[in-house]
Image (cartoon, rainbow, N blue to C red):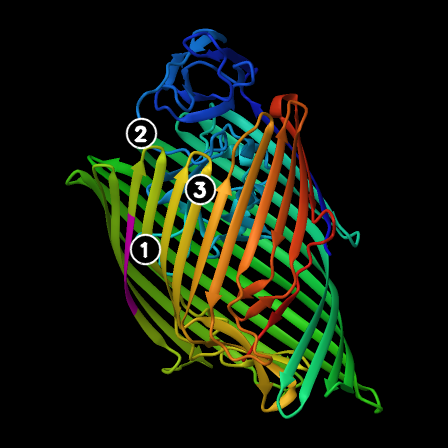
Amino acid sequence: MRVLFVFFVYISSSIVCLAQDIIGKIVDEQGKAIQYANVALLQANDSAFIKGVVSDDTGRFSINTLDKKNCIVKVTCIGYKTVYRNISDSNLGAIILKEESMTLGDVIVKSSLPKTRLRNGAFVTTVAGSILEKSGNISNLLDRIPNVTSQNGKINVFGVGEPVIYINGKQVRDNAELDRLNPDEISTVEVVQNPGAQYASNVKAVIRINTKRKAKDGFGFETKTFGNIDENSRFGGYEQLNINYQKKGLETFTVLKIKDGENSNKQGLVQNTYVDNVWSQRNDIEGSIRNRQLYCGLGANYQIDSHSFVGASFNFNRMLNKAVINMATTIDKDNSLTEESVSDITKPGNTSLASGNVYYMGKIGIMDINFNTDWLWDKDFSKVNTLERYQEHGGDWHDNAVNTKTNTKNELFASKLTLSLPLWKGRLSFGGEYSNTNRNSSYDVQPVGLLDKQDNRIKEGMTSVFCDYTRKFGNLSILAGIRYENTDFNYYEEGKRMPEQSKRYGNILPSLSLSLPVGKTQMQLSYGATIKRPSYYDMRSGIGYDNRYTYESGNPFLVSEISRNINYTVSYKWLMAEGIYTHVSSPIVMLTQSYNDNPNIALIQNVNWKPYNRIGASLAASPKIGIWHPSLSFYFFKQWFDMDTYGGHRLDNPKVTIRFDNTIDTKLCTVSLMLLAQTSGDDETSYMYRNYFCTNLSIYKSFLKGKLIVFFYANDLLGTGNTHSRMYSG
């Protein structure tokens, strides 16, 4: 059980001029009020989005802005023509909307804000002016995007897995960049479940976050205070300061963040080994970890003209952590106790990470240009000190001390160029990508002779070229692409290149997407393939020491896992349904085996397994009833994973997830109650054998016309969010 309470406050200020309200009323041709119309404040010169609101039950709206000069108002509503209005006075009076008889180009998935549209192979959710602006933080915002979950620091896209995230076209390589964003700074969120040729082969999904443009020139700052407490009275929190300055085309920003927190955890782990005898190892683990962080981000963007932007950024992240773990272990042979032990473990560590980015987005004639260069350096040190006391049943107690040290250093340089231009009534995009990675890792064990030391180095170079073409044939839109990717992977031990572990990959990856609107129904069919290459850690050759009974090892002979995906999506108004079929070749799975035929010692290692198929389906409904914003989602997952298991358990049991989010939005505050239930079922070699249920609650309240925001969040409110799973190893 884990109950987490969060208290979150942030204050923003801008030193420019006094704020003022632009008011008006939205009515139809008969003078009747139109509620829930979208009212957006735009820059007059380039239509850049500044701020958005929604008309209330009486059709009235009010936009608080710093300066109404050089701005226009755009009013949109489903079933009505879009209206633009110049701002000559703070009171715009009645704005009349005429009925729209034309079929909309984008089909609305949800009937009220937030809106999600299918566009160019992506689900595009409008955050600006919607209830999502009151999500409190970026994690909660992403968790409310259709087909996306964001829990405990992990982000996943339904049916495919962990996404790569972009902010304004730049890839996020350090999650601290993501954490500094506030929901009310975001314009749209785009989710791509079947990325095309423009993305690397290992990218399973893409989330593109587009932020709003700052309202006016001037200096502004924002402070954010965050605090949390868990069920064991462990405290945590951070303080963040954002400083921005904008003048004409120049924008600079600075972010400072200090974080300190402690989390606790309890878990039970039972491992059964079936050989001539049945050996059972039970571990009861209780521990806590303290994390401290210092983050600094600097950057500047400059708008050369209405089509061209250039910018650079630098980020530094320093993290310190220390885990303290107590573990009690018993070993049974045929239900008879043979050995028991108690372990005290401390794990101090630290990480230093620096990264930078330089970009240019512009236009030369009819050609669009997008160029990004990234570099990253990080150094990680971790130490594990283990003091074990063990005895065979009826024997004397013995002490065993084991200390390990791991040093890792990574260096990355990556560049990507994408060019795009109109061609044959369509649009052609093409470009190339290059990255170079160096990784050095050393592992030392004391006492000497228990396990071998390790000194590994990995050098990897990746070069790719890609091309895609999109065109409409009547109502049918086609996006076809192809990507060639070459990876040169070199593995070294003690300075010597290891030919068997060094590999060269060359892959051609086609992709195809078809989109067809039929009235207000939008359909999309897409195909793509992704490659999961073994990580550096997975391919290490040495054996790591966890405790007296558990070792870990890499597998230098792993081959890449390839997934081929077919997605079909259909949407109508506030309903959306999706089906996914995936064929997985050479899946990489974690297995536990006896070490040197000793059933008392478990060796954990990743291996390639037989190919298998899986399917997924989802159905989401997000209507709006007055101040109530319900969102109900169903997810279905089933696999056909072939593995002989003790007891004959088949790894093909389906899993169903139901999520019901309820948000009440009033002038007083915004309250959200989120319910999540999951049935038992299989996911590769893991079987969740008990149902899961979790209840979360959030309260959002703003003061001082949005300058002061208070956000409260309670995670696993009823304390029922416990997972119970069983992992099979054949």
Q: CA distance from mark 1 to mark 2?
A: 38 Å
Instruction: Please provide the residue range marked out in magenta.
Output: 506-513
Magenta stretch, overall SS: strand
Q: Are marks 3 and 1 in contact (CB under 8 Å)?
A: no
Nearer the camera: disc 2 or disc 3: 3
Q: What residue is drawn where x is 62% and y is 37%?
A: 662
Q: Which mark is residue 305?
A: 2
Helix, strand or loop at label 2? It is strand
Q: The residue under label 2 is which amino acid type?
A: Asp
Nearer the camera: disc 1 or disc 2: 1
Instruction: Please check the rendered image and state whether residue 510 is part of the magenta-colored stretch, yes or no.
Output: yes
- The residue identified by callout 3 is 576
Question: Which quarter of the image is occupied by the C terminus?
Answer: bottom right
Badge 1 or badge 2: first in the primary sequence: 2
Question: Which quarter of the image is occupied by the N terminus?
Answer: bottom right
Q: Are marks 1 and 2 in contact (CB under 8 Å)?
A: no
Q: CA distance from mark 2 to mark 3?
A: 39 Å
- Front-lying residue, 171 or 328: 328
Q: Residue furthest left?
A: 424
Q: Which mark is residue 527?
A: 1
The spot of residue 222 in percent (x, y) is: 60, 32
Q: CA distance from mark 3 to mark 1?
A: 19 Å
Helix, strand or loop at label 3? It is strand
Q: The residue under label 3 is which amino acid type?
A: Met
The spot of residue 403 in percent (x, y) is: 68, 77
Within 10 Å of disc 2 (Cα), the crowding (few <14, some 14-19, many 20+) is: few
Q: Quadrant of residue 323?
A: bottom right
Within 10 Å of disc 1 (Cα), the crowding (few <14, some 14-19, many 20+) is: many
Q: What residue is drawn where x is 68% and y is 68%?
A: 347
